[in-house]
Image (spheres, coloured by chain):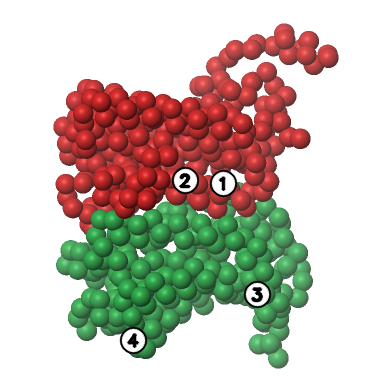
Chain colours: A green, B red
Amino acid sequence: MVFGLRWAGSGVFLVTEIRVQLHEWLAIVTGTLTPGALLVFVAVLAPDLLAVTVIGALVYSMFLIGQRVLNEAAYIRIDHKLNELYHASPLTPEAYFIGIAGGMLVAYLPPSLVLLVILEILHPLSPFALLVLAACLLAVWAVSATIGYVVSTLFKDMKTIWPYSALLTNLFGILPPVFYPLRLVPLEWRSAVLVLPTSAAAVLVNAAAGLEAITAEEAILAAISLGAEALALFAFGIYWARRTARER
Amino acid sequence: MATDIELSTQPQRGRVLPAWAWIGWRWVWRSPAAAIVPLLQPFFFLYFLHLIAPAEYFPLQVAGAMLFSTQNIGSWCLSDSAVFRIELRLQDIFVASPHDKMRYLFGVAFSNLIPAAPALIALGIILAIVTSVSLVGWLVLLACILTIWVLYSAIGIAVSSRLRSQREVWPVGNLIFTLLGILSPLYYPLSILPPVWREFAHLLPATYAALLVQGALGLGPAGSVNLAADAGLLVLSTAVGLVAAWWLYQWRER
């Protein structure tokens, strides 16, 4: 009963967010631009890396959902003051967080499906690789949505948000080996990048797809890091949503 | 009418540019990430390109990053002028003041050049390290940067005047400036692009800026006829772009 009450309104809010986001088709299209740009760079300059880059684009697209959660949560709170209304309703804070994160995930899936089709044409995945891909993408979504939501609660105006959201997406998405293979990273940096959720996910999928050979230790480090970060951060996101539901 | 009389007694010229520069600087000062991100943004792309592309393209990519950073100022102008108009209602005050439209446009562009300047200077230093640049090369690069700055700032401000909500700023800005940045051969030679893309790139002013800079730095075809043609087409396409931006821009709310 208590558990049920905790999630009251989740379904309705999730559907509301999906509908709101699907109306923002331009934002969905533009979300594909940075991965699209990097795909273009690779197609022009290093076509042999294209399959790895498409997997990177899938992981990056999932990570970008965090940026969208950040913008949406901040927009609802700062510009529209709508979160006050939501929190005064039977909708619980955790349902609010899950609703935004889940709504973004569903609304932003179509570009990822297009990338998946391209990947299947370039380098067909085995059922095992598809399973690894799905698990890794879900883990990246959990991490990025939490980071986006938590960061959104720290700002008081919209204008200061974009540098931080751009910094986060670049630091997690472009610098580590997400769009390029792990073998291009110097040996001494490999353990460090395998702890980052985005590069851990990309490396695991590349390995499962047979695009890159990694050692058992590297696979274990990447899998444990990604799994632990996803679970811990998502739990923290729920805790943070409860804690920051009301403005002080 | 009374307002007209009062306005005519007010100073019509003033220290407008320093004031706008101060606005740009204050934004950087109050939001350090706003200073760091534009500085880092071109380096993220350069790092990625350095890993995947042949090493001989690196000087070309550094010069391209300078033009790309300048082009991105247009996106910041779009965002700023949208915030001034939609959120702060500041544009109404400018419209009512003796500050004319042209100075307002130039001021917004100038205030956004300030946060980009450190990145441009850092990239210039890297360029000087990775390739030898003649005085003419620097002058051409500077002229191209100024041209691209004026044109893309005008496009950003003009587009922002048509936006109705802050929510549109990010997708519209991203769509326009990322697409234009990718389609122009800033990070790769025009010659390696597929034919259709190459033809389309010839419609964009940044393409001519890139070709001119690459030619002047000895990183691409450098015949004097080529350079003169690229310079002429850059001026022409910039003029067309500025006229289009002027036509699109709305100074007063209807």
Q: Residue furthest bottom?
A: A1
1 or 3: tag closer to the N-terminus:
3
Same chain shared by disc 1 and disc 4 = yes
- Circle number at residue A14: 3
1 or 4: tag closer to the N-terminus:
4
Q: Is residue A20 visible?
A: yes
Q: Secondary structure at mark 3?
A: helix
Q: What amino acid type should be assigned to the residue bearing mark 4?
A: Ser
- Give the CA distance from mark 1 to mark 3: 27 Å
- Give the CA distance from mark 4 to mark 2: 38 Å
- Give the CA distance from mark 3 to mark 4: 32 Å
Name the residue beneath numbered marker 2.
Answer: B177
Q: What amino acid type should be assigned to the residue bearing mark 3?
A: Leu
Kindly report which numbered mark, 1 or 4, lies closer to the viewer in this rendering: 4
Q: Secondary structure at mark 2?
A: helix
User: Which chain is mark 1 on?
Assistant: A
User: Which chain is mark 2 on?
Assistant: B
- Circle number at residue A126: 4
**Which residue is found at the position 40% from the left and 60% from the top?**
A35
Name the residue beneath numbered marker 1.
Answer: A159
